[in-house]
Structures are given as C-alpha cells and as structure tokens.
Image (cartoon, grey):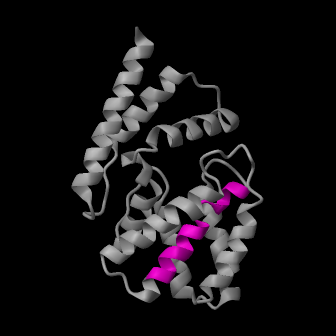
Amino acid sequence: MQYSKVKTYVEKCLQGLDSKLTYHNAWHTMGDVLPVAITFASKVNINQGNLTILKTAVLFHDLGYLQQYENNESIGAKMAEEILPQYDYNPEQIEIITKLIISTQIPQKPSTLLEKIICDSDLDSLHRDDFVVRGNDLMAEVISFKNEVDEFDWLNIQLKFIKNHTYHLDVDINKRNAGKLENISLLDKRIASLDE
C-alpha cells in the first residue's frame, strides 16, 4: 500500500472542493478526522497494516463531495475502488476501506473496530470546545447546498442530533460524553435566548 502517494493524490483532489463546503472541506479530512483517527488507533493498539487501511479510508470518506452533496459516501467508496489498485492496494484491503467509508453515513452503524474509530473520529467535534464554531460552519454549508434554515431551527436540529448520538469507542468515553453534555447545555441556553 503506497499510502504516502495516495495522501498526496487526495490532498490535490481536496483542493477542488467547492468553497461553499465550509464544514466538509480539506481541513475536516486532513486536520481533524485524520489526526483523531490516528490517536484513537494508537490507544486501541491497531497494527500498522490496519492503521494504513484506516488512514486511507479517512482520506476518501468525504471525497464524494467533489461530485454531489447528498449520499456522497458511496461516491467516495467508488473512487477508492477505482484509484487504490494503482497504489498497490489489494481487493481485500479495498473492500475494507469502502466499508469504512460507507460506515460514516448518518445514521452511523459501525460493526468493526476500524468502523467505530472512523465514525467516532468523523463526529469528534460533538464533545469539543470548537463545537459551536464547527456547527456554524455546518449551518452555512447546509444553507448553501440544501435550504434556508434560521438559527432557531438549526440549533434544534443540532440539539436533537447530539442528544441521539452515541460514541462507539470506549476510549476517553467519560471525557467525551461530559463534553457532549456541556455542548447540549450550550445549545439549550442559545435556544432559550432566541425563544424569549
């Protein structure tokens, strides 16, 4: 698996993403999901081969946004199937990678450890201090690609999502769940202030 060459290829592709993708952009893939996935993998002792498979899946997990906004995961998986044989990935490795990409589709239903890692990494911001900033980025993106939504409705959508969300890995689970509770409280307060 020539991962470093794949990474270079994907980095160039990500430069072609629409500038209106204020959430699902190159930073989300390279600066957020990838390092978080690597951290989780080290904490659960993933071997080198599986780590390369995981990192490759992260690179491709949002590449489908190059073609369309909805149901982009299947496009990213198809791109991986077409591109990765050129970089010495075998059919078994590619099959795992495509399943990892598809597993990030909402609602997430991961079944393997690697799927749990990529899913938790993809939604890691739900527990973090940058949750509000990332949420605002996502709202701007949704308005650009789908429909107009006001702040009150958007905050309620976020609140419902974060309340129904469950992390799949036990890694730092108490800390991550505590962070989610803090962000739920922040959302409640913002909604209440708009509802006055």
Residue 8 locus on image (x, y percent): 70, 76
164 or 49: nearer the viewer: 49
Give residue 176's position: percent from left, percent from top.
30, 52
Q: Is residue 186 above or below residue 177?
A: above
Question: Is 107 rendered above or below residue 142?
Answer: below
Q: Residue at x 46, y 28 (%)?
A: 155
Q: Which residues are magenta?
A: 51-66
Q: Position of residue 156 (x, y in %)?
A: 43, 27
Closer-to-camera residue (128/195): 128
**Quarter of the view holding residue 193:** top left
Q: Is residue 145 left or right of residue 182?
A: right
* Residue 82 shows up from this direction: no
Q: Nearer the viewer, residue 111 or 144?
A: 144
- Screen quadrant of the N terminus: bottom right
Quadrant of image for the C terminus: top left
Magenta span dominant secondary structure: helix
Q: Is residue 171 visible?
A: yes
